[in-house]
Image (spheres, coloured by chain):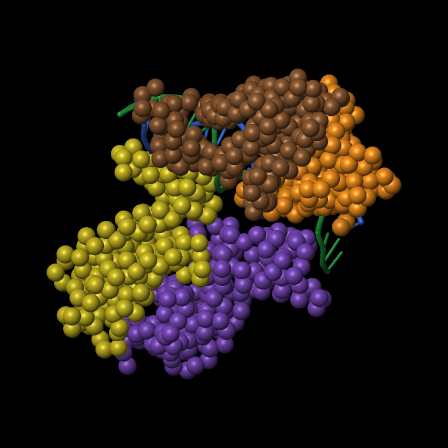
Chain colours: A yellow, B purple, C brown, D orange, E blue, F green
Amino acid sequence: MSPRGESTKQKLFEATLRLATEKGLAGLTVDEIAAAAGVAKGTVYYNFGSKDGLIDALLRYGVGQLAERLRAHAAEPDPVAALESLVDTGLEFIAGHRGFSQILVSELWRTPGQWQETLSLLREDIVSIVKEQLQRVADAGRLPPGIEVPTAAAGLFGTLLVVALDWQVFQPQRSRAEVREGIMLLVRGVARQD
Amino acid sequence: MSPRGESTKQKLFEATLRLATEKGLAGLTVDEIAAAAGVAKGTVYYNFGSKDGLIDALLRYGVGQLAERLRAHAAEPDPVAALESLVDTGLEFIAGHRGFSQILVSELWRTPGQWQETLSLLREDIVSIVKEQLQRVADAGRLPPGIEVPTAAAGLFGTLLVVALDWQVFQPQRSRAEVREGIMLLVRGVARQD
Amino acid sequence: MSPRGESTKQKLFEATLRLATEKGLAGLTVDEIAAAAGVAKGTVYYNFGSKDGLIDALLRYGVGQLAERLRAHAAEPDPVAALESLVDTGLEFIAGHRGFSQILVSELWRTPGQWQETLSLLREDIVSIVKEQLQRVADAGRLPPGIEVPTAAAGLFGTLLVVALDWQVFQPQRSRAEVREGIMLLVRGVARQD
Amino acid sequence: MSPRGESTKQKLFEATLRLATEKGLAGLTVDEIAAAAGVAKGTVYYNFGSKDGLIDALLRYGVGQLAERLRAHAAEPDPVAALESLVDTGLEFIAGHRGFSQILVSELWRTPGQWQETLSLLREDIVSIVKEQLQRVADAGRLPPGIEVPTAAAGLFGTLLVVALDWQVFQPQRSRAEVREGIMLLVRGVARQD
DNA sequence: TATGAATGAGATTTCATTCAT
DNA sequence: TATGAATGAAATCTCATTCAT
């Protein structure tokens, strides 16, 4: 709550995200994180109790950031355009936080994984934002029959994550617009053509 | 090569897959693997040289199995039906080998991952099978303009993996047919309607 | 000196004794003590300078209390009865301050113990009270030959401590009178029968 | 079970006992213990799982040694002489294993202490040996009325421990025979005079 | 007089790997 | 072909102490 404490946690989150992009979350050491954040090792333990505690808090923080950005693009009047904006924002975030996205994708579907409880809740947060946008498309009568909004939302979120990572890792020469168009082809295939 | 040696390796593969479902590859220790397989720790080193050697062999083995099954369904004359069969086979494999699939999704896009080199090659194997089928659809003139086969193949593979895992973990009550239909709606959105 | 300061020190003493019963002095952390006392960690350092300072002050405080009570029973005219009263008072104190007694028994004979210097002095305080009473018995000609007062005093103190703790921990159903009688059998064996 | 494993544990026990006499058990580090035993730090963890595991095993080992020695002196035909031999053996052991005895005295009456479960059982072992000898004295009709054997055995054990430690720490100039005689005065006061 | 975030030295623990059998 | 005790580098974690407020 104190400004000092908050900024310390912030510094640690940011340092961890930075390092995770370079080396992956699994390979990070508390020493590295503390050094990158410019604090003592003990400070990590003072603030988060354990390395796992830091990761857990980081997941909440990162998903919070992602959710915030996705929600910021809900204003678009045309529902399909809004969805496109959401996809683009998602791609931008993932490209900018690859290490974080990597941990999401690798922990999200782990059966009893260490952070599964946390992640299940966080997944719901994101999926519900996607769901809302898809619902707007459905309300506009532009979803073909047979599409269930909750299922499609979960699928779209997973696809977005995985396609974005594949882009970053295996096809870095493509532009974000290209990748967005690739995903939108699927979405437009689903959303009824005008 | 001897049956005894093979069964030792097999036991180690199976134990590793069983454990990986619960704890992920990075969290596995050689002690645990050996104990779960019912062999001594030294046996892992005798057979695979190192922990990485074991994982590497396991990945090749698993992807080999998946590729074999996917190829077996290439005979279907109608290209869209063949794609559907491929999707169904993929779903079946993932449902039956969740631990392995979890590993794939965890490690495939890990940037400096220890097994990234191996996995890049293996990813190519699978993606090229998908590509072949999509190419047949394209050759039949049933792909809308703007779709690039290589990109779509990579996307379809990732989506398949992620949607299947989401099904297993978060929506286990759905039937494989339902999930397959969900994915085919996307594919049919892409493949030109008959 | 101020009532507030006193109560802070008192709170810290009490919290430390409470915790020491469970975990011993060595296993206590300043964090735990402060939390149990309901004050901030810095307050311990403000009031006592260091963890050792707190323990040191606590030992002096506790031994002071014990010595005060033991001295209060020196008035008894019959020297053997006075010794019995002293034993009874000792048992009462130990039963009522088990945590403190546990500390004494743990630390008193620890060779390079951190608080050994303090404890040696404090031990002398108590032993000298016992010695005084035994000397009165000796002066009354009721100690058999071969008994050295200083040795017997040290032995009686240790026995009292240990028997009282054994009573509290392993034989709580016995009454204080019973335990006192057990010790007095030894003492009366030593003190010449009337 | 293997000779190598046993001798490693033995080496660790002996090194720990040696160090405990010098520095007390609480202040020992695994580094020191491993170095003193001439093995790698990991070897401690391989053999005992944790520092606590080592201490726990050491307590069993030490008490086993003490019990063995005490039992070896049960042959003496005269029961009071047998008791004297037992006391002497106890004093010798404690003098030779001060660090170990220190931990016994400091943990034995700790309420929920870390090793209390182990120690309660071990205490029973020792006390029952003392009980046996006292029972022989009682059977010979040489215990005065009012002495309960179990109570007296527990008391004698505690007194022996505490008097021996007090001798070692505060009165090292006394001989073992002197200290033994001091304790025997109590015992003979209790045992009926011939 | 009191606070509590931050520290860092030093402790415990982990675990892939080796090697004699 | 297999074993498992031993290793040690490197990780995680603890905690008495400091200090700005």
Q: Compare residues C79 and B2 and report the one nearer the observer.
A: C79
Q: Compare residues A75 and A6 and report the one nearer the observer.
A: A6
- In terms of image quadrants, where is residue C110? top right
B31 left or right of B170? Answer: right
Q: How many marks?
A: 0
Q: Residue at x 17, y 57 (%)?
A: A74
Q: Quadrant of the C terminus of chain D?
A: top right
- In terms of image quadrants, where is residue A38? top left
The image shows residue B113 at horizontal and vertical percentages of 48, 50
Residue C169 appears in the rendering: no
Q: Residue at x 38, y 49 (%)?
A: A56
The image shows residue C52 at horizontal and vertical percentages of 49, 24
Q: Compare residues A57 and A135 and report the one nearer the observer.
A: A57
Give the farthest residue toward the front.
C194
The image shows residue C55 at horizontal and vertical percentages of 48, 26
- In terms of image quadrants, where is residue C147? top right
